[in-house]
Structure formats: C-alpha cells, structure tokens
Amino acid sequence: MTFISNLINGISLGSVYAIIALGYTMVYGIAKMLNFAHGDVIMIGAYMSFCATTYLHLPVPAAIFMAMCVCTILGIVIEGLAYKPLRRATSLAVLITAIGVSYFLQNIALIIWGSAPKTFSSVVPFGSLRLFGGELIITAESIVTVLANIVIMVGLAIFTKKSKMGKAMRAVSEDKDAAELMGINVNVTISVTFAIGSALAAIAGVLLCSAYPVLMPTTGAMPGIKAFTAAVFGGIGSIPGAMLGGILLGIIEIFSKSYISTQLSDAIVFGVLIVVLLVKPTGLLGKKIAEKV
Amino acid sequence: MKKLTKILSLTAAMAMAVSALAGCGAQKATETADTAAGTSAAVIKIGGIGPLTGPAAIYGNAAKTGAEIAVEEINALGGDIQFELQYEDDENDAEKAVNAYNKLKDWGMQVSLGCVTTKPCIAVSSEVFSDRIFALTPSASSTDVIEGKDNMFQMCFTDPNQGIASAEYIKSQNLGTKIGIIYNNSDAYSTGIYNKFVAEAQTQGLEIVSTQTFTDDSANDFSSQLNAVKAAGADLLYLPIYYTPASLILAQADKMQYAPKFFGVDGMDGILTLENFDTSLAEGVILLTPFAPDADDELTKKFVEAYKAKAGDVPNQFAADAYDCVYSIYEAIQKAGITADTSAADTCEALVATFTSPEFVYDGLTGTSVTWQTTGEVSKKPKGMVIENGVYVGMD
Amino acid sequence: MKKIRELNSFTRTNIACYGIVILAFVVLYPLQSAGLISHSISGQLVPICTYVVMAISLNLTVGFLGELSLGHAGFMSVGAFTGVITAISLAAAVPSPAIRLVIAIIVGGLFAGVAGLIIGIPVLRLKGDYLAIVTLAFGEIIKNIINCLYVGIDESGLHFSMKSDAALGLSDMGRVIMKGPQGAVGITKTATFLSGILLILFALFIVLNLVNSKTGRAVTAIRDNRIAAESVGIGITRYKLTAFIISAMLAGMAGALYAQNLSAVAATKFDFNTSILILVFVVLGGMGNIFGSIIAASLLYMLPELLRGLADYRMLIYAVILIFVMIATNGTRSKLIIAKIKSLFRFKKSPGEGAANI
C-alpha cells in the first residue's frame, strides 16, 4: 500500500511538473527558444489569482480567468518587446534575454507583493479521496491537475492538428522561412503561441499553488527548472513527451526520496535524467532530427 | 571587436547614469535621516546586511524593518545619541555580503548589525574581526559566526543551544516518545539544530524513529517524507526548519490525516503571520521561540503596531531580534559613553567590554535579563509556546 | 596575403587581451596598495578576476567548441572545495600563504579537470539543448553531493562523511573543514589581486594558444561544420574532450582562487544561477571573443554593486539593462543601425567573433 501511495504522490507531483512543461515545450516547439521566464509567468499567474480571490473576493472561475487574461497579455508583451527583436539572433542570445525577463518578473513581483510568502487557498473545492479505509489518500488537487493535464494535452493536440492557426504553428515549427513564403504570418503565429503558452502558465500557476500553497516571488523558479528538465526528458517540442516526462520525473523524485535517500534525491533525479538522455539522446518521445549537411 | 565597443559604451554609460541616480537617491535618504536626527549633526552610523531580494528576502526585509523602527524611536527621543541606519542587500550570498560590507565601510559604518542569515554572516564575521568593527547579528545562529571572534555577538540563540533545549524540553514535558524529524539538509541553520538535537536526544533517552530531509530545491512536496514518518509511527514530529516549508508540511499532513504533535524551533515563528494561512492547521503546534507577536506586554504591543504601520504585516522573530539589536547597542553605547566622534575601533573595544561585562543586562522584545558571554553567545531563555485558537500561549 | 592579415589580427587580439589585463593591474595595484580606492572596489577585485577566468574558460566551451553548458559553476565548485581542503590540510606543512594558494589552485584545477573528463565523455555525445540540460544536471548533482559532505582532518589524515561532523570521528586535534550545507568555514584568506591577475594571464595564455593551435583550429572546424570536419579526418571526440577538460580545469582554478578570497564558502553558491551569470558574461562579451569576455565579466560584475543605491529597484534595473543590452547587440534592427554607424568609421572586422551556431 505504501508503494501505491508513493506512486500516487509521484503522479500528482509529476502532473504539476507536466503542466508547466507543456508551456515550455510548446514555445520551444514553435519558436525554437528556451523560454526561461515561463516559471515566472506561472508565479505572476498565481499572484493574480491570489489577489482576485483574496482582495477582490471574486469567485474561483473568474479569478482563474482573470489570471489567464493577465498572463496572456503579459506573454504577448514579453514576446513583442524582448524576443521579437531577436528573431534572427542566435538561440543563446534569446536564452539570455529570457533569463533577463525572468529576473525582471521576479523583482517586479518582489516590489509589488513584497517578500513575505502568502498562503494560496486551493481552488479545488473538494476534499481528498479516501480508499481502503483511509489507507490510500488521493488529494483532490492531484486529481484535478491530472485531469487538467489530459484536457490541455488533448486540446493542444487537436488545436495544432485541426485548426488553421495550429497548422500555421506546425509550419512555422518545421521551417520559418518556408512558412513565410506560404503566406503564413510568422510574427502573429509566434505571438499566438506565446499567448497560449502564457494562458497555460496561469492555469499551471493556480494548480501548482493549490497543490503546494506557498506563494513567493521565487515560487516559479525551481518548479520551472524541474519542468524544463521534464520537458527535455520527454523530448522537448513534443506535447505528449512533456506530459510523460513530467509525470516520470515526479515519480522518480518521490521514489528516490522514499526508497533510496531523501538527502540525495535531487542528485538521483538528475542522475536518472542523464542516463536516459545518454541512452536516448533526444529524450523519450523526441523526434530524431536528420542532420543537415 | 565590434561587440566590445558596443557593450563597453552601452553598459558603461548606463551604469554611470544609474549610479549617478543612485547617488542622488542615497543622498536623499541621508538627508531625511539627518532631519529626523534634529539639529545634532553627529550621528552614529549603523550598517546592516541581509537578503533584501531573492528567495530569502523575507528574513532580510523583516530584520531591516525591525531595525528601522528601533532607530526611528531612538532618534525621536532626541537624546545625544542619534543613529543613522543603512541596510545593504546580500542576496543570501557570502560574496555579495562581503561586497555589501565593503560598501558600508566606505559609507563610514561605526557599528555593524552583521548579516541576517548564517552563511553570509560567517564570511562577514571574519571581516569585522580583522577590521575591528563591533557587530551584533540579529539572527545568524551558527556557532561558526562567533567562533574565535571577540567582537562578533549574536542576538539569537545558537543552533546547538536550540537543539539541546528542544530535546530537554520534549523530555521534561513528556511530549512524545517516538520522534520523527524532517529537516532541510541544504540549510546550515536546520542541519546545525538537527545535529545537536540528535546528540542530545540520545543522552536524554528519546527514541528517534525516522529522520527525513529535504532541500531548498525540493521544498514543495513532502508526501514521501510524511509517509515515512507516519509509517515509522512517530507521535511527535520535530521540525527544525523555517515556517514557509513548515506551513506546507502542516497542510500536507492534514490532507493525509496524520496528526502527530508538531514541535518547531524559532524559525517556525511567523507561521501565524503568513497571509491567508489557515491557522487551524497550526493548532497544537509547539515551538521554542523568544518572541511572540501577540504577547500582552506594552513593548511588544507597541512594536507590533509600529511594524504593521510600516510594513503592513505582523513582525516575526527576525524583526524583533533586529529591533533588540539596535536597542541593546543603544544601551551599551550610553553605558560606555560612546559618541559619534569615537572611532570605529575604539567603539568596538568599548562595546565589547560593555557587552561582556556582567553588569550589562538587557530587557527587550525577545527576552528579559539578556546577557552575553565572552564568546559572543547570548544567554536568554527560550519560551515554550503552543498555538491555541490561532494564538501563541506560553507553556510554562 | 590573406593569411598575413589573419595572423596579424590574431596577434592583435592577443595584444588587446594581455594589454587590458596588464593595464588594469598597473593602474589599480598601486592605487590599492596606497589605499586610494574605496573598500568597495578593492574588495571586488579578486571576485572580478575569478569571474573573468570563469568567462574565459566558458568561452572555450560555448564560443569555440559551440556547446552550450549550463553547469559551469559545478567545476568551479569542485575546484573551490578541493582547493580549500588542500589549503587547510597544508596549513602547517607550507607556511607561505602564496605557495599554499598556488598549490590549492593547481589541485583545484586538477580535480575539476578530472570532473570535466568524467562528465565530458558521456556529455559530448549529445547535442544542443540536450547537452545543455545534462550539464545543468551535473551541476545540480555536484551541488547536492557537496551539500551533504562533511570533511575533517586530524593527524591520521582526511576523514569524510555524508552524515554529520560528529560522524567524522576526528581526534581532539582534528578540525572540521567542510560542514555539509554550511560549506567550508575558517578559510585563511590568501587570495590577492596579484594572484588573480596572474591567474587571468595564465588562462589567457592557455586559451589563446589553444585557439591558435592545431587543436584550436580543429575545434573551430568542428563547431562550424561537424560533418565536414569529420570527413577531413578530425577526431571529433578527442578534440572536443580536450577543449572541455581545459575549460573545466580553468574553472576549477578560478573556483580555488574564489574560495581563498572568502572565509566561508558553501555549495549552494555554485548553483544554476551562477552558471547562468557566467554564461551571460560570455554571450554579452561575444561568443568566441575572449577580449569581450574580459570586459563583459568585469563590467557586469560591477553593475549590481554600482546600482546599490537604488535599493529595491536594483535587480529590476539590472534585469532591464540586461535585456536592453542583449537586444541592442543582437537585435535585427539595432544591428543594422550599428552596421551603418560602423561603416562611417570603417571599423576593421576581426575574426574569431563569428557567432557560433548552436
């Protein structure tokens, strides 16, 4: 029973990583950039939702909607101001700019909301699910997070496969120049990608803070890095890969804590990651890219 | 070399522009402090260092605000001794702390409040030692901070002191027989207390059934640690950690319906002040702390009010310790007859002599009849507190 | 004819790099000795030297080898702690602090080089972002392990433990060198500005010679076109590994110097953020541009210190400047403007600054 309990804990931790990783992987897949500020957009989303429920006393759906709107606008603004001028620059230049944006968001949150941590009230109105006479407890937050993951993943898959904008995104992802020649507005497509990625970040922020209810300006940083790891683990650019990578990372983390050592759990998680990447150098579900000669 | 020219010109120009601005800002701050000081131009300069940005910013900002309140109060008294306080950011990093310290030295710091957090404070303490500047840290609690430095003092308990006191308290109050521990093994404070606690628990005959750790990087999910502690049948969970992760542990333990006795140390203080925190989760939590923000005495009431007015929230122990630091320095300065003209080195020797003299007894927010040993360690009694109906209640 | 011009520009880069370092020393050293510069600046000199060496060494990996590394601080960490252990162990045997510092730096460099070898063999098989994430992972692993490590010394030698300082089983004469999360404490400060400058010159000597050697040309060839390089018989792995190990070694030496400048140093210092900080120096200075790395590391290190007066807005402004400078130096539109200005002044283009394709 402990094993199953640990497994469930792993899945619920992993589903939080997964939902953040989805945002990373989507932006990477289309704009080909590592958006290191994604974790901080999540933090902003969580603060927005916190303010809406605590100060404005809005109902939860309205609060989430507000957080999504703010994050969407934020995403578009960040993309337009910081990343767009660097469209033709090296990916490293964009990476450093993204880090600059990440510092910026963290520090602006510090100035607006202060350094004192805030307790986030869970947006999930149900209690935990108890099985086998209370021996196995599944929190409502983890059920909701897993469900949200599945919905978002399926939604994104349908969107990119079927809709016109989704097709444009895939075209931009394959070849920016060719897409442009085909009459696709690359700038708009990338902006939309950021808008969707940031709206997802708002949801991720709300779910992250519902599961682990502490909110600080640095709340998004570490989960962001872990989720980035998860995205690479699953094969960056692949939407199912992000989900798989996130959940596996969560399970590995919980299992190494439970069965090997809590002290060295970080080292073990990253160790497993390295081994996997050595065996499968493009991640679990990553596409093998043919080399251009 | 084209990039170089660009960067050189851009960065240098911006840096200069900004530092010019910075200069203006700093000057303004000095002016206001001077006007607050009234007509007497001579002020004693106190410098403090702490994390004002980054993940540990809460501790640095709390200490800064606490010290500011004390300085404002003292200056408002209009006596001969007027203070000017400057706090510098160290981002909880030893290297940045030394930079901040040098900056304060350039500013003309006469007395130092050390650093707020342990790791930077160890680095800065050897600087104040070689520069002969008196330092009293509000909250850097490792013994390495004060070891071998005669002019470095602490306002808080040392880590070993807390660990030993916790074990003794648990034994004497008979709080639990099977003890589980969760501590932060990437944090010097937490590990320091843990190590001493384990040693003392052995001599006291307490049984430790499970020891679990976490790091700053994985301070979100405690389910596997709590599962392990629960499976080991612990009836008391010892948490020598800060209140932010502690609040997560309480929430997660509640979700899995695990309700042992929770026992915290002074880092746990502040848990009730967390904005929006469901205090019912902390019901029955016992902690050793020198400061309770809802104590009835006049001093605490006045301080809490001033803090709320200034920072908008309830002060924690860091703020109270910093407040006490400034006041104890103030009293010692009065006693030693130090004026603003006394050099930093003379101030240092006089303050060391005063602080270590048996006649020097300080009564403040975090304790009464507080004295200091020659090692720099403070002697005050930790109070056992239990949280009942969302407020601290003294246990003895 | 073209060859001669190339050669000349190599020499020019060399002169510029050595020149600026020596100039900085000649100007600052007398001022520091005479106590004419503020404590604030004088205290930053050794850290700046450290970060300059870090930037030079990372430039070797990122700029010349063309591989993104996000775990460079890990090597710094290895060098720092092995250096500290060496220096403290030799405290009685070697009374001269200067010699002790040199030994610490050498040992730190060697251990970091070994770490570079261990990490390099598997890592260099990967490419691009996957390589980046594995270097990040290694950096985190090193941090996590050192965070749990307790090291002590007594007359019977060094003791190691992963549990606590009590578990080291030291005799009464012994002393604890590393205390887990608290890191190494009680370090005697032996680093000086002079030693920092000498280390930079050493790093420059190694890197500039390497870059202009057969190995260096092979490495650049691999960066620019791996398949073409392979097809002309360049042993990819060997050259990549050589460059990676040298880069790690120099980082280790910088780490050893860094630790000898502080009385306490902890593993958490050498985290992802520090790796990123160094990467920022390299990218801003221009990938493959050593001179740029030196300038960028010095200026960007001083920037947050200069901004101290802004209090709460300090890091915010720092972030804005970072973004602004990145866009100004790499943006499409700003590039055009700069090119125009440049054509007015007819700047000569120097080689080795072609941005790497990563």
Image (cartoon, rainbow, N blue to C red):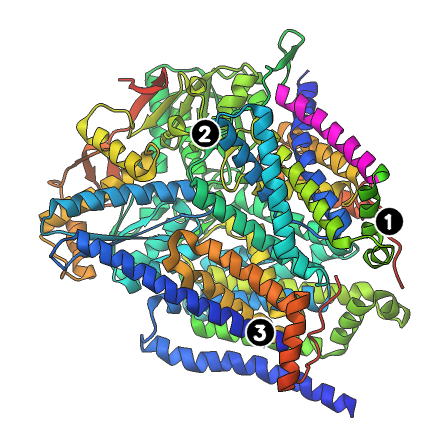
Q: Is residue B294 left or right of residue C260?
A: left
Crowding near the residue tagged with mark 2, few <14, some 14–19, many ≥20 C-alpha atoms within 10 Å: few
Residue at the spot of label 2: A55
- Residue B363 place in picture, x, y as percent: 17, 34
The magenta-colored residue range is: A140-160
- Residue A14 place in picture, x, y as percent: 68, 31
**Eye-nearest disc, 1 or 3:** 3
Secondary structure under the numbered disc 2 in the rendered image? loop
Q: Is residue A25 left or right of residue B186?
A: right
Q: Residue at x 83, y 59 (%)?
A: A177
Residue C103 in view in this figure:
no
Q: Are marks 1 and 3 on the same chain?
A: no
Q: CA distance from mark 3 to mark 2?
A: 46 Å
Q: Nearer the viewer, residue A232 or C261?
A: A232
Q: Identify the chain of the residue marked 1, using the numbered disc in the image.
A: A
- Residue C23 place in picture, x, y as percent: 48, 82
Q: Which mark is residue A288?
A: 1
Q: Residue at x 14, y 60 (%)?
A: B41
Q: Identify the chain of the residue marked 2, using the numbered disc in the image.
A: A
**Eye-nearest disc, 1 or 2:** 2
Q: Amino acid at mark 2?
A: Tyr
Q: Identify the chain of the residue marked 3, using the numbered disc in the image.
A: B
Q: Against B116, is B241 above or below?
A: above
Q: Amino acid at mark 3?
A: Lys
The answer to which image quadrant residue B25 occupies is bottom left
